[in-house]
Amino acid sequence: MSGAGEDPLEETEKDGDTRVEEEEEEEEEEDYSSYYREAESMLQDLKEDDIFEWGKPWEEEEEEEEGEEEGEEKGGVEEKWEKEAVREKRKERAAAVRTEVAVGVQEETTAKPQEITKSKISVKKLPLTDSQAGTFLPSRKLGENADQLPQDELGQGGTDLEAEKGERIQDKRSSYLSEEKEKEFQPKTEMPKESLVATSKDILFQKNDRANAYPLTLTWSFGWNSSLPVYYIRDENQRVLLYVCAHNAVIYNVLENNQHHLQGHPNMISCLCVSEDRRWIATADKGPDCLIIIWDSFTGIPVHTIFDSCPEGNGIRAIAITWDAKYLATISDAEIQKVCIWRWTLAVETPACTLDLPKEYGFQNYLTFNPTNNKELVSNSKTQAIYYLWYEEEGILAHSAPRLTEKTFNKLVGRFSQSVFHLNLTQILSATMEGKLVVWDIYRPPSSASASPGFPYIKPCKLVHLQKEGITVLTTVDRKTLLGPVYGSSIEQVQILPVKSTLDLQKRYMVFINRDKVGLQILPIDGNPHKTSAIICHPSGVAGMALSYDGCYAFTAGGRDRSVVQWEINLSALEAAVSLGGEDLTPFYGLVAGGREGKFYRELEDYFYYSQLRSQGIDTMETRKVSEHICLSELPFVMRAIGFYPSEEKIEDMFNEVRFSEYVDTGKLIDKINLPDFFKVYLNHRPPFGNTTRGIQDSFNVLGFTSSSGKKVIRREDFLKLLLTKGEHMTEEEMCDCFATLFGLNPEGWKSEPAASSVKGSEICFEEQLPDEITAEIFATDILGLTVSQDFRQDPMVSEVVRNA
């Protein structure tokens, strides 16, 4: 038989070779399985011992190595034996581990990839830097350049394996790591390659929320600090607001209805500011251990914190940042306030420059940099504005703080609210709670002057009355007075019609109500009477108004009539009225009696051209220069000649409106005006309801007393005193000159030229010209020369000026 004929020795040798190969393969698989089981076991032991923290394995080894080095320095024989004993114990411990692992090799010769994955992921849950990954984890994917991985990356148990078996185990290990499994080895939390602070992308509301690591986590803040500003910190495509709520700053995404909280202040936030690009936010607080924190609004990360910013005070009162975000300025909240400038980008804890402010400057509560020069600042208290110039090389903060009084402009100035730099001129603008604007000129010493030039200073040059209410915020918008809808009474409520699409934004409309009417107005308002229309809605009075969501209907509610009326809005009809009304000045001629061909407009033309003669001199023999313009300084004289008597404040408003009318487009100031523009200025600035006797009588009711005849009168002495001390008070010389003109003591009946006055103001005897008691009727007819009705108790329009020959 063929089977019996085989050599048993040869068969035995083959079986032996097969067993050897199988044993070698089993041994390799055993070593491979042992490698990973040992790694998994050691990681599990580390986890169970609660010592799975970066740095501890290295610390233990370093302590042992330090102990060995100390033993060598002592040079004792016992220390050397102890050193050798430690090494032997390590080897025995490693061998024992391998023996225990090898017992179960025959039952399962291959390691489970899932177990390896779990072990590896448990390590990679912690964020690692490249230096930390050297012992436990590589910073690259497993399987890539596997031969370059450290041998001890999974623990000390792998360090005692032979090099040859280690290479074969590496090859075996690579075969188990497919591309799908490699994804599971990636850490769930990885450190970014670049700093979050250095990123140029807005990722504040894009990144996932981190796992809550605290028992209590702030999730939403309700309310805001209304005494601090609210900033719009994103472009027009996003609605993201920044405001303060208690000791946190809140970045609120309106569209996503999401909040990000800037937490870190131990006290109430007292002030904040934002850089020009809305990237950097600076916040400060008042109280013990006060802080100044600069935040990156793109990431919400605090990039720098200034501790002990005012150890002598109680915190920060005002803060500002330059347009390029390089410097930060603060004013402390102390009895002796300190101004500090910080180079916060250098991460310094001390200011680059400081200045202590005297108490008499008042409590400075507002601060800002010049947007065109980051070495200039301005601050103000309620009573004083301060200009600063920082000499960076010398470390000097020079300042100028002139004090204003009522005598400065001969008018009431009011308390300051804010101060800003003019964008294009060397001026500072300070707003007041009286609705006025103080204009300061900045005088800087020339750089080519002497070696020690004087410091710059500011000087008040102008006071402009902008509005009746106080000015709390200064902006860069243009201001212009325009004639609004006039239908017997002032406007009481306005609402803007909602738009249906972006195309409708090109033209907007306004619905308004006054005492008894509802009306529609095309925006922007320019004084054109055809752009508005109104109708009586409730004769007994309107209580309120509302619009439908689509802007097609208006609803008005009456008061005494207890009714609600619905009105359909027809915009095309109003647009048609504008088209039929004409262009240029044609719509405006109808606003004066007689129109363009009427007596009033003809007189206006005569006065306008007469003003050219007056400005060139009445008695001059030189050739006259006839043009279409008059000097801007002639504007108030022509206004008074046609019966409009504006106050000095109103005249200043008209000057500024004309002077800066083309400044935004051309950068040039206007010093002359033509007849069409003058006509528009007159229509927009004159009282919309004219001069009424009721207004004059109301003034006498307040200022006067009841005489024996039962009329309200003002004594002559009190009348003259009021003119010298109240309102736009006059000097005594100005008052005498005005009365000389009103009484017809000058040749032409009005003061046409300074040389034309034949009577000096000091020569006027008021006892002869003015009665002892002055009534409203005497003031209007005998002094001002106005024509009124026979019954002064009625309310006629005071329209005509009586000129005495």
Image: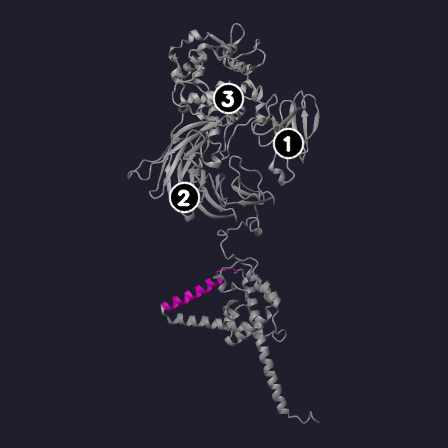
Q: In this view, does 92 lie above or below 758?
A: below
Pointer 3 residue: 605
Mark 3 or mark 1, which is nearer the start of the sequence? 1
Q: Which amino acid does label 3 sit on?
A: Glu
Query: Picture coordinates of residue 224 (x, y %)?
Result: 55, 38
Mark 3: few/some/many CA within 10 Å (<14, 14-19, 20+): some
Q: In this view, does 726 lie above or below 463?
A: above
Pointer 1 residue: 575
Mark 2 or mark 1, which is nearer the start of the sequence? 2
Q: How far apart are marks 1 and 3 (CA)?
A: 32 Å
How is the model colour-coded? one colour
Q: Answer left or right for 732 relative to 785.
A: left
Mark 2 or mark 3, which is nearer the start of the sequence? 2
Return the residue nearer the eye: 525 or 166: 525
Is any atom of residue 471 visible in this view? yes
Query: Picture coordinates of residue 673 (x, y %)?
Result: 47, 27
Is any atom of residue 775 visible in this view? no
Mark 1: few/some/many CA within 10 Å (<14, 14-19, 20+): some
Query: Picture coordinates of residue 281 (x, y %)?
Result: 49, 44
Is 450 colored magenta in this rendering? no
Pointer 2 residue: 342
For this orientation, the residue located farthest to the top is 708
Residue 21, disc: none
Query: Picture coordinates of residue 616 (x, y %)?
Result: 41, 22
* SS at mark 1 in the image: helix
> Which is in the foreground here, disc 3 or disc 2?
3
Return the residue nearer the eye: 715 or 121: 715
Please give the range of residues in magenta.
52-73
